[in-house]
Amino acid sequence: MEDAIGSTRTEMTLSSRWKILNKELAKWRNALAKAMDNHRSGENLSSEIMQAQMWFGATGQGKKSFNHTHCWEVVKTCKRFQIIPTGPTVVLNETPLHETPVSDSPMDSPMSQDSPIEKEPRPIGRKAAKAKRGSNSSKNASKFLEELSKHQAMRIEMDLKQQEHDMAIQLEYAKEREYVHEQNIEKKDRETMPWIQAICPLKQNNFGS
């Protein structure tokens, strides 16, 4: 019976723990996916992880950094947490695959020889695509850092206002305590005064005698 109760408690504890880990892992998966989208060619893995940690700490409530790396290594291949990279289409050639042949004979072409022949637009090259990707990633990173800086500035401002409010309350409370203390002293003095007035004539008579 005790073994059954212990087993039930263990199962409930594991279930509760998994609910917490499940949220943290899903949040980390989304942060890592954003970091992978912004990842530029030539950057190492540590910069990608660092950016993912920044996304993780800046979104929503909860922990500021992800510390369950060993759990992530276990679940990252599961369908629920798997990250499918969505990069730009790779251009294989810098020249068009097909060009419209130009005939030497005007009879073979429906267009007149005097009409200009429109060329197909050249596809974007690898270097241009990489430069464009890097520019977009840089803009996204700058925008993210700007938003993060604004968020931190707002939080600092709110903390300062809260501190000022708390100090004002403490000061008001201290003034109130001081006032109550003074009132208590005055009350005690008033209560003691008749006794002092009654004693003083007796002392004077004793000194006179």
Image (spheres, rainbow, N blue to C red):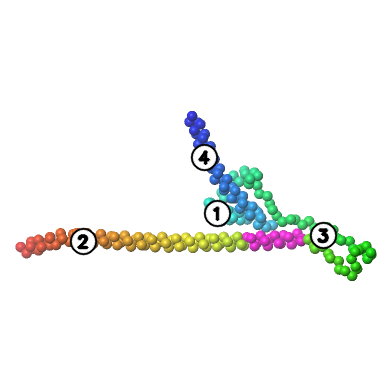
Residue topped by disc 2: 189
Category of crowding for the residue at label 3, using alpha-carbon neighbours closer than 10 angstroms: few (below 14), some (14–19), many (at least 20):
few
Residue topped by disc 3: 96
Category of crowding for the residue at label 2, using alpha-carbon neighbours closer than 10 angstroms: few (below 14), some (14–19), many (at least 20):
few
Q: Earlier in the sequence, mark 1 or mark 2?
A: 1
Q: Which amino acid is tagged 4?
A: Thr
Q: Earlier in the sequence, mark 3 or mark 4?
A: 4
Across and down, in percent, residue 25 comes to 59, 47
Q: Is residue 129 magenta?
A: yes
Q: Earlier in the sequence, mark 2 or mark 3?
A: 3
Placement of the C terminus among the 4 image quadrants:
bottom left
Asked whether, in this view, residue 89 is left or right of residue 100, the answer is left
Asked if marks 3 and 4 touch (Cβ < 8 Å), the reply is no
Cα gap from disc 3 to disc 1, whole angstroms:
47 Å
Asked whether, in this view, residue 136 is left or right of residue 8, the answer is right
Residue topped by disc 4: 13
Q: Earlier in the sequence, mark 3 or mark 1?
A: 1
Q: Earlier in the sequence, mark 2 or mark 4?
A: 4
Query: Which mark identifies residue 60?
Result: 1
Assign the magenta stretch its main secondary structure: helix
Q: In the image, which residues are magenta?
A: 124-141
